[in-house]
Amino acid sequence: MRFLGIDIREDSYAALAFERHYSIPYPSISDPDNLIAALFGTAAPQATPSTYIIDAHGRIVWAWFGATTYGHLDLAVAEAAGP
């Protein structure tokens, strides 16, 4: 399992400052023009932050718009991974 941040609506300097300030432990890429986000179609981010769990086949299996918690993420990852 891998995590990747996609920084939307921010230039790369602002995104890097955010990552440093909050000690984000996973890699992030910059998408200030929402080009990557547009690939999600109707599931495009409705709020920031938005969190998606995408399976090995590229399907969105879980989406959360707005802040979430590690507890929610743990449950969603376990559910997405299956038995």
Image (spheres, grey):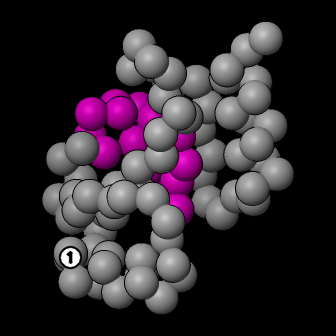
User: Residue drawn 40% across and 42% down?
Assistant: 44
Q: Is residue 83 above or below residue 39?
A: above
Q: Is residue 21 above or below residue 36?
A: below
- Pinpoint residue 63: horizontal percent, then vertical percent: 59, 38
- Pinpoint residue 40: horizontal percent, then vertical percent: 35, 33
Q: Which residues are magenta?
A: 37-52
Q: Is residue 5 above or below residue 14?
A: above
Instruction: Determine whether, in the image, residue 54 is placed left or right of residue 31.
Output: right
The residue lying toward the viewer, choosing from 58 and 34, is 58
Kind of element beneath mark 1: loop
Residue 4 forms part of the magenta stretch:
no
Is disc 1 surrounded by few (<14), some (14 to 19) or many (20+) residues within 10 Å? Answer: few
Which residue is the site of mark 1? 11
User: Residue drawn 75% across and 56% down?
Assistant: 70
* Residue type for callout 1: Asp
Quadrant assignment, res 27: bottom left
